[in-house]
Image (tube, helix red, strand yellow):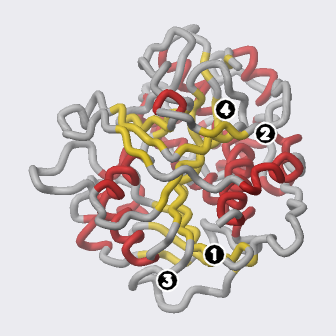
Amino acid sequence: MIADREWVRRNIGFDPVARPAPASTFSFTPAARPNSTAEDLQREIIDFDSESPAGREFFAFTTATGLSRFTDIPWPNGLAPKTGPKPSGTGRGPLPRADVLVVTWTVDEGHALSRVLTPGKDSHNDYLSYTHKFKAISSKMRKGCPALQAKRLGAYWTTKIGSKKVVVFKSDSHLSQDIKKLPPQGGTLPNFDVWKQIIDEVQPALVITTGTAGGIGTWGEVGDVVVSPIVQFDGIKWLKSAPYHNAVFTSTAPKTTFFAKTDGLFAANAAQLPRDNTRPPKIVQSAGPGSSVVTTDFFGFDTSDNHYGLQGLGDVSEMGDAVLGLVSSQMATPPRWVAVRNVSDPQIKAEGTLKEQAALAANIYKAFGRWSTVCSAIVCWALIAAE
């Protein structure tokens, strides 16, 4: 699939180039300005909240739908997620122990993941704020980043799938936002510190990092899910002098017993995905670096003219998962881990300016990111159920 302006108009109801959405539809105000940058659009993707007034304004302007349209998923008997009680404590201490740790990133990813894995509890409104060692870790962060604005490292709740206890964590720490320069020699990235800390506390057998991503190449449709025990850095900007700037990290292949069940589970909400999709969502399992998850240190997305040089590197690009690989590579006994990324925006046709192309990608995410995340959340369920 290649998305051009006409594709966007058909599927979300307006052309962001000819008729930009009103400022009231933006969660990150600078992204609405005529002189906004690609970095502003990246932050809008992180902050956009479909459940907020800005989200309601977006729905009024577009044909996009919110999670009020969510249809309950017909889980197999005995394997429906069972939301845990309120975690004990205040969030100022360590996370609870669990068999699996699931981490997601943007506000709308959090809404969708919590709707699937912690029914009745929303990551934005209900989860317990996590501030353990916030002062020490946040001292490395730059002014205005999401974690400093939220005054926390993230938020969490617990759930159970079958016999497996799960910690679901919505992170406010982001590789792309915490800091824009390498720490002094011997220092670590704030997001590295967060990953290391929460893994040490939960002591999981399996870690899943999950959320939205941009499709690389024309293979993907919105809602497809890449499952990859391989992540790699494509650090060509502020990470270019880091020793790991192009490193590839690999974990053990995940257990996929329940993947056969996902088609029927996707179907419950597939009608909310783009009308131009030609088939139901599918799962793509990474077979090597060329079909893996690529972590960039810039707001990169695939274009038909391969502007950012992503083609051939992997199946999807995003801005953080390789930090999990880096952390695990430095642990004596790391847990198994896997990246589960949904295609929230496909390859963008190289027409107009690069900023206009970025606006297309960002608006596709705002229209469908929560619905494509429902698909990847179901895949997370399948991986946990197979444990």
Spatial CA distance of label 3 from label 4 is: 36 Å
In screen coordinates, is 297 left or right of 257? left
In screen coordinates, is 79 left or right of 357? right
Q: Name the secondary structure under disc 2.
A: loop
The answer to whether marks 3 and 4 mark residues whose Cβ atoms lie closer than 8 Å is: no
Going from N to C along the chain, the mark reached first, 3 or 1, is 3
User: Mark number for residue 96?
Assistant: 3
Residue assigned mark 2: 64
Please tell me whether mark 3 or mark 4 is closer to you in this view: 3
Residue assigned mark 1: 126
Spatial CA distance of label 4 from label 2 is: 9 Å
Mark 4, Cα crowd under 10 Å, few <14 / some 14-19 / many 20+, is many
Closer-to-camera residue (165/44): 165
Looking at numbered disc 4 in the image, what kind of residue is underneath it?
Ile
Q: Answer whether residue 367 is visible to the viewer in this image.
A: no
Closer-to-camera residue (86/249): 249
Q: Quadrant of the C terminus?
A: bottom right
Spatial CA distance of label 4 from label 1 is: 27 Å
The answer to whether marks 4 and 1 mark residues whose Cβ atoms lie closer than 8 Å is: no
Closer-to-camera residue (170/279): 279
Q: Name the secondary structure under disc 1.
A: loop
Q: Position of residue 192 (x, y in %)?
A: 31, 57
Going from N to C along the chain, the mark reached first, 3 or 4, is 3
Looking at numbered disc 1 in the image, what kind of residue is underneath it?
Asp
Q: Position of residue 86 (x, y in %)?
A: 62, 86
Q: Residue at x 49, y 19 (%)?
A: 311
Residue assigned mark 4: 364
Please tell me whether mark 3 or mark 1 is closer to you in this view: 3
Considering only vertical position in the picture, is 365 above or below 290? below
Q: Residue at x 65, y 19 (%)?
A: 218
Q: Quadrant of residue 362?
A: top right
Going from N to C along the chain, the mark reached first, 2 or 1, is 2
